Amino acid sequence: MYKRSFLGAALLFSLGLACNGQIGAPGGGPGGSSGGGAVGGGPTPADNMMKAANPDLFAIASKYFPSTDAATAAKRMVRLTRTQLDLTTKTLLPAHAKTAAMTALPPDPLQTNYEYAANLSFTPANFTPYTKWVEGITASVRANPASVIDCAASSNGVPCLQSEAKKFVGRAARGTLSDAQLTRYADMLTSGVTEVGLPDAVADLVDVTLSSPNYVYRDEVLTDGATLLQPAQRLQAMTYTLADAPPETVGLSSATPAASLATADDVARTVDLLLGTPEARAKLMRFFVSWLEVKEPADFTIAPSVFPEFTPALAAAMVDEVKAFLSAQLSMGAPTLKDVTQSTESFVSDALASIYGVAAGGAGKPTALDPKQRLGIFTLPGVITSHSGPDTTRLVKRGVFFTRKVMCMPLGNPPPGVNTMIPSTATGTERQKVESVTQTGACPACHSVINPFGFMQENYDPLGRWRTADDGHPIDANISVDFLDEGPFTASTPVDALKGFTNSMRFKQCFVRQMFRFYTGRDETAADDPVLRQMFFGFADKDEQAIVKLLRVLANSSSLSQRSETP
């Protein structure tokens, strides 16, 4: 009974967290918080410095992020994502984490394709798979208990068992447990060794530990009098935010977290260390794939009856190319967004050669693409096809993606009763069909924004192939918009359109927002404007577009280090 009562309490507490709608999403909007603990209004010292350095850019930054009433983000409990569970468990139990959490657990609900903290909980759909995953790990531990608790030299004496149990559980909880709490785990182990023997006792210790909320959740709750997270909580907030991993994975210590955070210089060094790790670059890759909404090969909706050439192998090749392209750009010492959006090279495999109409570049070698047809990530077939329909280009769908995710322009739902289907009798190009049903009534209010983003892509068929005609009619890729800070903008080709949009301030501020949302796991609020203003200014100043620098500003901000009670 020693194990059953302890484990039951841990699991019930864990489920209690999942059932409480306030945990993980306190306060304001979805995944976010209106914050608490106002730290004062008016311009910050950083604002004054930015305004002095570049008043015109500061004015634009203040337009997009106007609030000066900064407030500390609310306290929250955050369940680890499946990626984080994988890295955490492989670090803690490298010999036993043989099945990935990504495989064992069902996907969590997404918000705009991001794993927001508000969406992460334990439910009937994923709780049983998680416990079965833990059972597989503990079965492996039972067969080799010395890989976790090795006290053979002391003949499994109590002092050694107690010490080793505390070390193991302390690492698992990332330094957040008190000595009294660790002692409970240690006592459970020593009692178990007496009652059921070492293999079962160690397996039970691992079972209880991995089932504890201290393992599957990370807390952003314990603070000092100045709302600063305690060192252990702050360090894991940094490592999971930037790298999806516990401190030990990236060469830091949960046992001595204060050593990494003692001074501002220590914090800066810790942030730089984190940003240089393979785990941080892998998370950056995950951000881009999620931001671009690139589908997995099995999730494309292209109809084989219409496009028989779209085989599973071609779908996989498209996704592989996107990842190879991103890997090449993001592996640079100081990657920029311009590297991603304006490159005219990619990694064309044999499977994709016919899509591009070029010769394959060979394994691992970049292929030069026609600069009149291709420009950066948005013209890769894997990205284009992710937003195509089963049998058409779905220009409206493509336009909605650009409007919401690339330019961060708000869109409501279609008015009630409006038929959003293109009549089957419509003829002409896809653009002409869309125009025939979106230029009257209430439609232009939204479609005046949506349509140009879709129309600029009409030269790409549903598979991302370049074309100059659609159903025998010439393509018209001309667009004209008036919603950019730079003034009215016109373009006649997709490349010219993409150059204009991705060089615009509206695009840059949206990219900053999307990174903030992905990395913090919540929507921004007005209280985040001071941090976002600083992130945007540094990103856009001199058109640097430095991605790691952007993350550095976020990591050194109060968004990661401070928490307050929800008002």
Image (tube, rainbow, N blue to C red):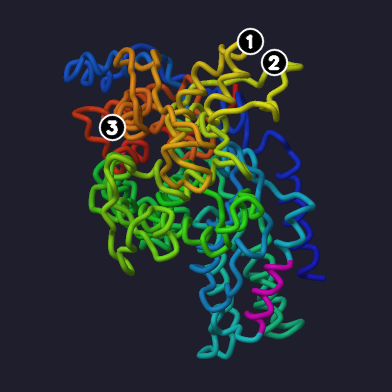
Q: Residues within 10 Å of mark 2 (few under 14, many from 20)?
A: few
Coordinates of residue 456 in the picture (x, y in percent) = 42, 30
Q: Secondary structure at mark 3?
A: helix
- Give 330 or 385, whichever is nearer the viewer: 385
Locate residue 517, reporting x and y percent: 49, 35
Q: Which residues are magenta?
A: 132-142
Badge 1: few (under 14), some or many (20 or more) residues near its Cα, within 10 Å? few
Residue 263 visible in this rendered orientation of the protein: no
Q: Nearer the viewer, residue 40 or 484?
A: 484
Q: Position of residue 504 (x, y in %)?
A: 32, 25
Instruction: Check disc 2 and report the residue beneath it.
Output: 415
Magenta stretch: helix, strand or loop mostly: helix
Asked which quadrant contains residue 511, the reply is top left
What amino acid is at disc 3?
A: Phe
- Which residue in the protein does label 3 denote? 539
| Foreground of the two, 173 or 527 | 527
Could you tell me which residue is drawn at 62 percent across and 31 percent down? 26
- State the separation of the CA atoms marked 2 and 3: 37 Å
Q: Is residue 210 left or right of residue 6?
A: left
Is 538 in the magenta?
Answer: no
Q: Give the amino acid at mark 1.
A: Ala
Helix, strand, or loop for circle 1? loop
- Does the CB distance between marks 2 and 1 fall below 8 Å? yes
> Do residues under tags 3 and 1 come within 8 Å of each other at their CB atoms?
no
Q: Residue at the spot x=54%, y=82% of the render? A: 147
Say which label, 2 or 1, has the lower sequence index: 2
Q: Which residue is mark 1?
A: 442
- Name the residue type under label 2: Pro
Quadrant assignment for the C terminus: top right
Q: Quadrant of the N terminus?
A: bottom right
Residue 337 higher or lower than 176, as above or below? above
Q: Quick one: SS at disc 2?
A: loop
